[in-house]
Image: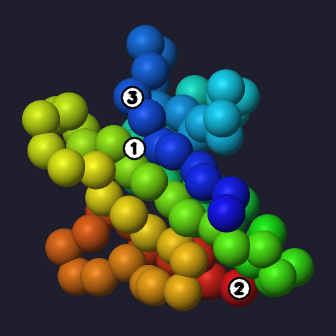
Amino acid sequence: MITFNVVKERHGWAIRLGERMTTPFRSRDLAVREANRLANAIRCHGEHTEVNVEPADRSGTAMWSGGSHEAGEGSAASPAAG
């Protein structure tokens, strides 16, 4: 399983894949959108992926989007069209 983690960084939001990180995004929503786009691109090749989203205030439970599930109502993540 390939896991993308959307996390708050010093200069914005970033997507982590293991120790690797993307360029920071200005907003959490942009980072989530890109993480879902990356996950969907990999899924179309038969890999299992997931997207974990760190809460904006860091006090709540991380949200999840990906795999065979679509983000439900109330989730900050939504699957990319494709």
Q: Which mark is residue 11?
A: none
Please state, as top left, top right, bottom left or bottom right, where the C terminus lies in the image. Answer: bottom right
Mark 3 or mark 2, which is nearer the start of the sequence?
3
- Amino acid on which disc 2 is placed: Gly
Query: Marks 2 and 1: in contact by CB < 8 Å?
Result: no
Residue 33 visible: no
Is 77 situated above or below 3?
below
Tell us which disc is closer to us: 1 or 3. 3
How far from the left and from the top, in percent, is residue 61?
19, 49
The vertical placement of 46 against 64, above or below, is: below
Label 3: which residue?
8
First along the sequence among labels 1 and 2: 1
Give me the residue at 59% from left, 50% from top: 4
Residue at which label 1 appears: 28
- The colour scheme is rainbow
Q: Is residue 38 left or right of residue 30?
A: right
Q: Quadrant of residue 71?
A: bottom left
- Name the outermost residue toward the front: 1
* Residue occupied by mark 2: 82
Name which residue type carries label 3. Answer: Lys
